[in-house]
């Protein structure tokens, strides 16, 4: 999970990233702890609608430091400790709702910081594109739409049915390159951690200084 300034195709500046788990990974791991089958995001959202979001007090890792960098590992650990003692279905709903509400607080705050950083650079193209599987989450869509209204940005979301479709994401990136006649002979090795901003400082793990 990261915040990027998109300068043009193949030219990105990273404003912030997660130092541990990705947001989607936090959703999937929390869903697994609640015995929800993979992919857990959509079902976890359904559980959250049935629960009390104020039932469990969950941590907000690095919420007031680190700029728009994020951390979700501590939140996942807190969910694990609570999930071990859950016995009733209503408890699962309450934990899902509390997790969802905590994520909303984190995403709202960190996105606000990212938008402020973006404006300080002197950009005038105020469009905030939210992509990936978590962009299908209704609550996240709503809070980021609200934030964009406050900050005078246009919130742009892919259609929900394409948010979690990696094949569609890769295909559209390939199409944009094709339009610009950017081809290669496919003789490079696979890079599972290929950074979009190769000049960005590597941030990973609890020992990172923020």
Image: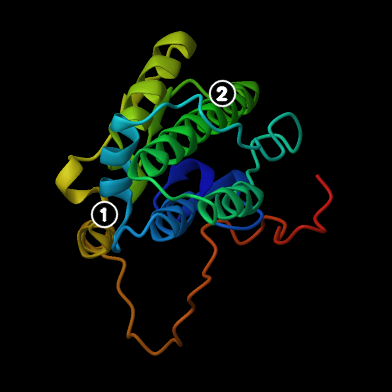
Task: Out of 48 and 169, give the one closest to the viewer.
Answer: 48
Q: Quadrant of residue 80?
A: bottom right
Q: Which residue is mark 2?
A: 112
User: Residue 70, image x and y in percent?
Assistant: 63, 43
The answer, for residue 132, to whether it is visible in the render is: no
Q: Nearer the viewer, residue 63 or 111?
A: 63
Residue furthest front as drawn: 87
Percent position (x, y) of residue 11?
Answer: 49, 51
Residue 24 image point, x, y percent: 42, 52
Name the residue rendered at 66%, 58% in the picture: 199
Residue matched to label 1 = 164
Classify mark 1: helix, strand or loop. Answer: loop
Colouring scheme applied when the structure was drawn: rainbow
Asked if the residue at tag 2 contacts the one at tag 1, i.e. Cβ–Cβ closer than 8 Å, the answer is no
Position above or below: 17 against 192:
above
Residue at image coords 56%, 23%: 112
Which type of secondary structure does the marked residue at label 2 adopt?
helix
Work out how far the residue at label 1 is from the one at label 2, CA to CA, in angstroms: 24 Å
Q: Answer with the quarter of the image where residue 118 lies.
A: top right
* Residue 187 shown left or right of residue 158 in the figure: right
Return the disc, 1 or 2, that comes first in the chain's sequence.
2
Q: Is residue 139 visible?
A: yes
Q: Quadrant of the C terminus?
A: top right
Number of on-image labels: 2
The disc at residue 124 is none
Query: Left or right: where does residue 165 sit relative to residue 107?
Result: left
- Identify which residue is drawn at 68% across, 32% down: 63
Give neighbour class at mark 2: few <14, some 14-19, many 20+ (Cα, 10 Å).
some
Q: Residues within 10 Å of mark 1 (few under 14, many from 20)?
A: some
Q: Position of residue 173 (x, y in %)?
A: 28, 58
Q: Is residue 105 above or below residue 74?
A: above
Q: Nearer the viewer, residue 110 or 40?
A: 40
């Amino acid at each position: 999970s990261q915040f990027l300034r998109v300068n043009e195709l193949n030219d990105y500046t990273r404003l912030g990233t997660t130092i541990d788990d990705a947001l989607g990974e936090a959703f999937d791991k929390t869903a697994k702890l609640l015995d929800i089958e993979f992919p857990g995001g959509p079902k976890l959202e359904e559980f959250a609608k049935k629960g009390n979001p104020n039932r469990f007090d969950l941590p907000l890792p690095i919420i007031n430091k680190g700029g728009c960098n994020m951390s979700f590992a501590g939140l996942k650990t807190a969910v694990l400790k609570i999930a071990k003692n859950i016995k009733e279905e209503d408890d699962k709903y309450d934990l899902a709702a509390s997790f969802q509400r905590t994520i909303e607080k984190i995403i709202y705050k960190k996105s606000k910081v990212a938008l402020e950083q973006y404006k300080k650079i002197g950009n005038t193209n105020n469009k905030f594109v939210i992509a990936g599987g978590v962009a299908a989450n209704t609550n996240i869509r709503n809070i980021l739409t609200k934030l964009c209204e406050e900050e005078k940005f246009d919130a742009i979301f892919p259609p929900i049915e394409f948010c979690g479709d990696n094949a569609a994401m890769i295909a559209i990136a390939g199409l944009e390159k094709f339009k610009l006649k950017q081809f290669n002979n496919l003789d490079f090795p696979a890079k599972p951690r290929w950074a979009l901003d190769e000049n960005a400082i590597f941030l990973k793990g609890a020992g990172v200084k923020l």
